[in-house]
Amino acid sequence: MSDVLKLMIYLGTSLIFVYSRQYIQLREMFRGEFYALVLFAVVGMMIMVSGQNMLTLYVGLELLSLSLYALVALDRDNARATEAAMKYFVLGALASGLLLYGMSMIYGMTGSLNIADINTALMGSVKIHAVLILGLVFIVAGLAFKLGAVPFQMWVPDVYEGSPTAITILISSVPKLAAFAFVIRLLVQGLPTLVADWQQMLMIMAVLSIIVGNVTAIAQTNLKRMLAYSTISHIGFMLYGLMSASMNGFVYAMFYVVSYVLMTLAGFGMILLLSRKGFEAEQLDDLKGLNQRSPWHAFLMLIVMFSMAGVPPTLGFYAKFTVLQAALQAGYLWLVVFAVLMAVIGAFYYLRVIKLMYFDEPIDTHPIQAPIDMRIALSVNAMALLVFGLMPQKLMELCAYAITRSLS
Amino acid sequence: MVAYCIQHILSFAIWTPVLAGIAVLFTANDNKPDTTRWLALAGSIVSFLVTIPLYTHFNFADGGFQFQEGFNWIPAFNINYHLGVDGIAVPLILLTSFTTVIVVIAAWEVIEKRVAQYMACFLIMSGLMIGVFSALDAILYYVFWEAMLIPMFLAIGVWGGPNRVYATVKFFLYTLIGSLLMLVAFIYLYLQTGSFEIVDYYNFPMPLNVQVLIFLAFFAAFAVKIPMWPVHTWLPDAHVEAPTGGSVVLAAIALKLGGYSFLRFAMPIAPDAAHYLSGYMIALSLIAIVYIALVALVQKDMKKLIAYSSISHMGFVTLGFFIFNDLGLEGAMVQMVSHGFISAAMFLCVGVLYDRVHSRQIDAYGGVANTMPAFAAFAVFFAMANSGLPGTSGFVGEFMVILGAIQANFWYAFLAALTLIFGAAYTLWMVKRVFYGEVANQQVAVLKDLNKREFLILAILAMLVLALGVYPHPLTEMTNATVTQLLSHLAQSKLPAGLVSGLPAPTGL
């Protein structure tokens, strides 16, 4: 699992570098700090993916988080960004505290910080004690914060909206891969004995995330904020895979995260592409008439939106299909029916984006300026959603390979 | 080579229009639209020709699936790219590819804005709909079914009328909600049988409560598509706002997707539930036939009137399905094909008027027959066909369904037959107000009669309506074996108690 996820993180980060170059150059953020901090964040993610010890995992998470806090505030004269950084930092520190507190309780009960040892200890002599459950609650809360699942989602829209888009694309994409690995390490490898407990917590978070994410997204006029709420609902769907607590469920949760990262990269990539000096293409209305300005880019965004809505023949459809299949297999029939109804609500705001691009006349008639490498990368990225949508087998196999190697 | 092509004829039928549509996109240049138009026409004609062998090489005695082909598409879920058609799919495939040619010609001078995208939308849609009719794997079917929404959504939204955004979003969301419930049913069936092959579902026994739930999930998807009362409200909106081509495709083919899918999925997979719920289905069909016909009577907008008339006619189709006899089923098939021609022609007629006067209101016209005699002749003919005049295809289907209904219950037939009166009333009343009488206003006085292009497409459709009305044999011959086989399948109970089977009984519901 770690190899596959690491490769994905490297790939995603490279794409982010390509997408964001012009953006940060135009905003005088093209400095060594940007690259250094992003790379530190990548190191943090690598540690999170590979760590086998609670402390190591925690250190990785903190390295990632601290780099992100600094990145959000990189454009220091921007009031919105500084505000977002502050919020992110305060809430993030709280979540880290919760996580660490939970870890200390688990340590107290099992006498070890090593994931494998904790598992053996719980399988063996240690009795399931209330403190253990309490520790689990804290850990799940901390994880939910990092993932951005309801009810720990408050920071997501503000931070997404406030950060410079080049940073938003980073926050919203690859760290989710690392957070997924983190969840697998702690819950599935470390605490499988408590499965009945964390399954319930994940279930509640999944359902709430899907409701809050989809319903709130409808009311947004800011594209970045809308994508933030859409992220929350995607996390909810991913949790459907995890809460199934079966090998299948984990495989398809991973498949969902990977698909989600591809979609998000393309979605924010498009915002970066449409932005130019002194202009952020972050309002929904900025997309108006994109089809007339550039049919190709409108088509790419169309694919991204339908993929996020889960309409075939795009990757997003298989992502939803597979996690719902896993959840149905685990017996959650009515939760699955609920999720598909929510997916219809979700489709509404994705359709609105398409409506703006295709049905409305453009108000912004500036030609789109973007370096050719960025255009190519974005095209490949968005077309990958279509190609994997037609042939999802390889990607599914990869995820299945990764998970079975790690968990069996 | 020929053998190879016949072997993969369905793949060719699906992908030729899709590729043609993509090719058309590359000619996008609104200053020189003629290249685009001719390329689109060539693409649609080739796509139509490709589907011809489905008729000429069809084995009429075989009620099972023919022209089967496939490979393992997504082994992780045992999903196959499995195509095949039987006697109920082939007529609809031919109807689809034929209608696409009509749509391309009908759009010739009318569409001036983003011609390439318009043509591409309809060509790609045609391929996807043929895919729906020929998929034998549930997920493959689902992919085509949903993917088809995307071009339709764009077609209505980009080229539609003033209230197009509301109409197209409503259309999309209505269809999506039903489809997703159907997807849940597919996943459930997959978990029980370990396969997405439709044929595997046919022989899979299930207790009644499970069957009912599965049937209702399918019902949610297909009833919206047909559309059945009371989930029909998206159709008048979508029709009114859609460009002429969009209306034609919606009425002629998209509605048939729902009817076809009842026969392919809901009824054979859950036959006991179909019998169990048939009373409700018949009631809904009769409400659609009678009540919607009355609604059509008071419409002021011609397209809306035809849209309601479509719903009423599709009520005949569902009535034919759920009386479970071969007259009813075959009549429903004839009705679907015939409605494909007639409604397409009616919408084209409205399109002809709309292009000239830019109004769809009935009271904007009057005395059109004086200025457009040739057009009036066609319009009156199609109106007659729509109200079920003997000698036209509209009569054959309705008559067969009514005969079938009499075998089931006299009152079904009585209520259904009422529509012959109502149908005549709303159609002929519209004709009277639009075509006859004094020339109503200056705009009507200067109308020019049909040009060659419009004459050509209306003439072809008129000939087909007549041909099918006088001699429906080629169509019934094709559906006969399949309908017989379907009925015998439906007559067998699939409840697990009566069957000796190694398959596990479904649990979890």
Image (tube, coloured by chain):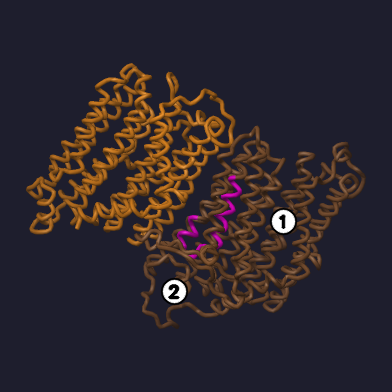
Chain colours: A orange, B brown
Mark carried by residue A142? none
- Highlighted magenta segment, given as a residue range: B120-143
In the shown orientation, is residue A195 left or right of residue B384?
Answer: left
- Residue B380's x, y, as percent? 83, 55
Q: What type is the residue that disc 1 sits on?
A: Ser
Q: Give the vertical position of B171 relative to B272 (above or below).
A: above
In the shown orientation, is residue A328 left or right of residue B126?
Answer: left
In the shown orientation, is residue A266 left or right of residue B454?
Answer: left
Residue that mark 2 sits on: B204
Whether residue B218 is visible here, answered yes or no, is: no
Whether residue A79 is visible here, answered yes or no, is: yes
- Magenta: main secondary structure equals helix
Q: Residue at coordinates 54% horizontally, 45% vertically from top-left?
A: B22
On the image, which quarter does residue A142 sit in? top left
Q: Residue at coordinates 14% horizontally, 40% vertically from top-left?
A: A56
- Residue B138's x, y, as percent? 47, 62
Q: CA distance from mark 1 to mark 2?
A: 38 Å
In the shown orientation, is residue B261 left or right of residue A189?
Answer: right
Residue that mark 1 sits on: B343
- Residue A178's x, y, as percent? 25, 41
Q: Give the vertical position of A114 relative to A70 (above or below).
A: below
Count of numbered labels shown in the rendering: 2
In the displayed image of the protein, which residue is found farthest to the front?
B1
In the image, residue B47 lies in the stretch drawn in magenta: no
Q: Are marks 1 and 2 on the same chain?
A: yes
